[in-house]
Image (spheres, rainbow, N blue to C red):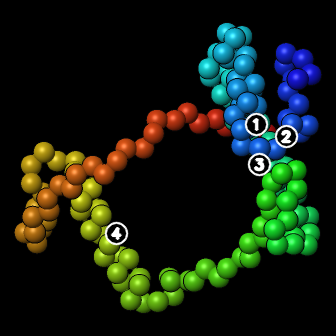
Amino acid sequence: MVNNNQIDLLGSELSKSNIEVLSDNLIKPFNDGFQDALEMDIRLKFIEETVKKAREKMNPFVLKKTIEKGCELFGAKIAFKSGYAILDYEQDKEYLRLKKLLEERKELLNMASKTTHNFVTDDGELIERVPVKSYTKDSVSYTFKK
């Protein structure tokens, strides 16, 4: 730790247990009452976006490296994963037909979920409400100025 506001992350041991320790150090200003939860979270989001951008910039150079099987660096196991083909299902007429039917059915189910009574289509089909599978988590989003 350099001072109260700075934490030396790059000189730390690269281990899962140390991630926990360093994450606790990162939120220390909040835990010690010097930062509000929202203030702390927006700073963490900024760090997250900064690291994401730095990794994007490093990726072309990393991919040029020869990585031997079983390679380890700083205690981290490294493995190269080859890219793979992603098929263009949209080029298949039957796929598109079924996809359209599925989208239409989802729309009917969504409409039924918004009613308290049974929902009947113009064709007389009864669409019963489906149960809630799960809920998304509440969240806060941040947009940084350019």
**Residue at numbered disc 4:** 103
At a point 89% along the width and 39% down the height, the residue shown is: 10
Q: Amino acid at mark 3?
A: Lys
Q: Residues within 10 Å of mark 3 (few under 14, many from 20)?
A: few
Front position among marks 1 and 4: 1
Measuring from the top left, give residue 80's x and y in whole percent: 78, 70
Front position among marks 2 and 4: 2
Image: 36 above or below 98:
above
Q: Amino acid at mark 4?
A: Glu
Q: Is the C terminus in the top left, top right, bottom left or bottom right quadrant? A: top right
Q: Amino acid at mark 1?
A: Asn
Q: Which label number is shown at residue 18?
A: 1
Kindly state the secondary structure of the residue where label 2 is placed. Answer: loop
The residues tagged by marks 2 and 4 sit, at their Cα atoms, a distance apart of 49 Å
Pointers 3 and 4 in contact (C-beta within 8 Å): no
Q: Is the N terminus in the top left, top right, bottom left or bottom right quadrant? A: top right
Left or right for 109, reference 139: left
**Residue at numbered disc 3:** 52
Quarter of the image for residue 67 reads: bottom right
Pointers 1 and 2 in contact (C-beta within 8 Å): yes
Image: 84 above or below 67:
below
Q: Residues within 10 Å of mark 4 (few under 14, many from 20)?
A: few
Q: Residues within 10 Å of mark 2 (few under 14, many from 20)?
A: few
Question: Which of the marked residues, 1 or 3, is nearer the chain's N terminus?
Answer: 1
Pointers 3 and 2 in contact (C-beta within 8 Å): no
**Residue at numbered disc 2:** 13
The residues tagged by marks 3 and 4 sit, at their Cα atoms, a distance apart of 34 Å
Question: Which of the marked residues, 1 or 4, is nearer the chain's N terminus?
Answer: 1
Judging depth in this view, the residue of 4 and 49 nearest the camera is 4
Q: Which label number is shown at residue 47?
A: none
